[in-house]
Image (spheres, helix red, strand yellow):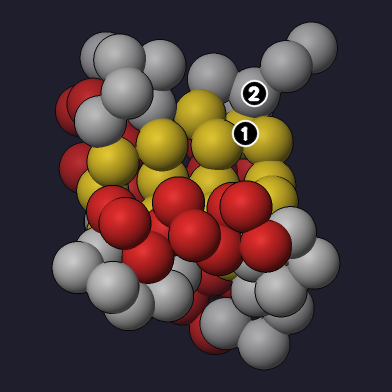
Amino acid sequence: MPGTVTMYSTTWCGYCRRLKSQMDREGIAYNEINIEQDPESAAFVEKANGGNQTVPTVLFADGSTLTNPSLAQVKQKIGV
C-alpha cells in the first residue's frame, strides 16, 4: 500500500530515524526518499526549505510540506 505521506530523508539524519520509528509505531504509512540518491528530490527539498537540504521534509497529499515535524504535527495534518 502506498504511503499516505512522502518523507525526504538521508541515511545519517537522526531526526529522520526518530520520525520514521514514531510513524511506524503509530501505523502511519509513508514513502521514503533518500535525497542523497535522488537529485530531483534534493532539489525539491531545497525549494521547500529556502535553498537548504533540510530533512526530514514531509510532503502531504495536498502538496504542502512540513520540515522536521513532530509526530503530533504529522497526525494533525493527515487527520489521525
Residue visible at 62% across and 33% down in the picture: 30
Q: Is residue 20 visible?
A: no
Residue type of the residue flagged with mark 1: Tyr
Quadrant of the drawing holding the N terminus: top right
Q: Secondary structure at mark 2?
A: loop
Mark 2 and mark 1 lie on one chain; the one further toward the N terminus is: 2
Q: CA distance from mark 2 to mark 1?
A: 4 Å
Q: Horizontal and vertical percent for residue 72?
A: 24, 44
Q: Is residue 13 visible?
A: yes
Q: Quadrant of residue 37?
A: bottom right
Asked if marks 2 and 1 touch (Cβ < 8 Å), the reply is: yes
- Left or right, residue 46 beside residue 21: left
Is the residue marked by circle 1 packed among few (<14), some (14-19), or many (20+) residues within 10 Å?
some
Q: Nearer the viewer, residue 72 or 14?
A: 14
Q: Horizontal and vertical percent for residue 31?
A: 68, 36
Q: Nearer the viewer, residue 34 or 24?
A: 34
Residue visible at 25% across and 31% down in the picture: 64
Q: Secondary structure at mark 1?
A: strand
- Left or right, residue 64 beside residue 19: left
Q: Which residue is mark 2?
A: 3
Q: Horizontal and vertical percent for residue 62?
A: 30, 15
Q: Nearer the viewer, residue 16 or 22?
A: 16
Q: Quadrant of residue 16?
A: bottom right
- Left or right, residue 48 beside residue 7: left
Q: Horizontal and vertical percent for residue 60?
A: 38, 27
Q: Which residue is mark 1?
A: 30
Residue visible at 40% across and 16% down in the picture: 61
Quadrant of the drawing holding the C terminus: top left
Residue type of the residue flagged with mark 2: Gly
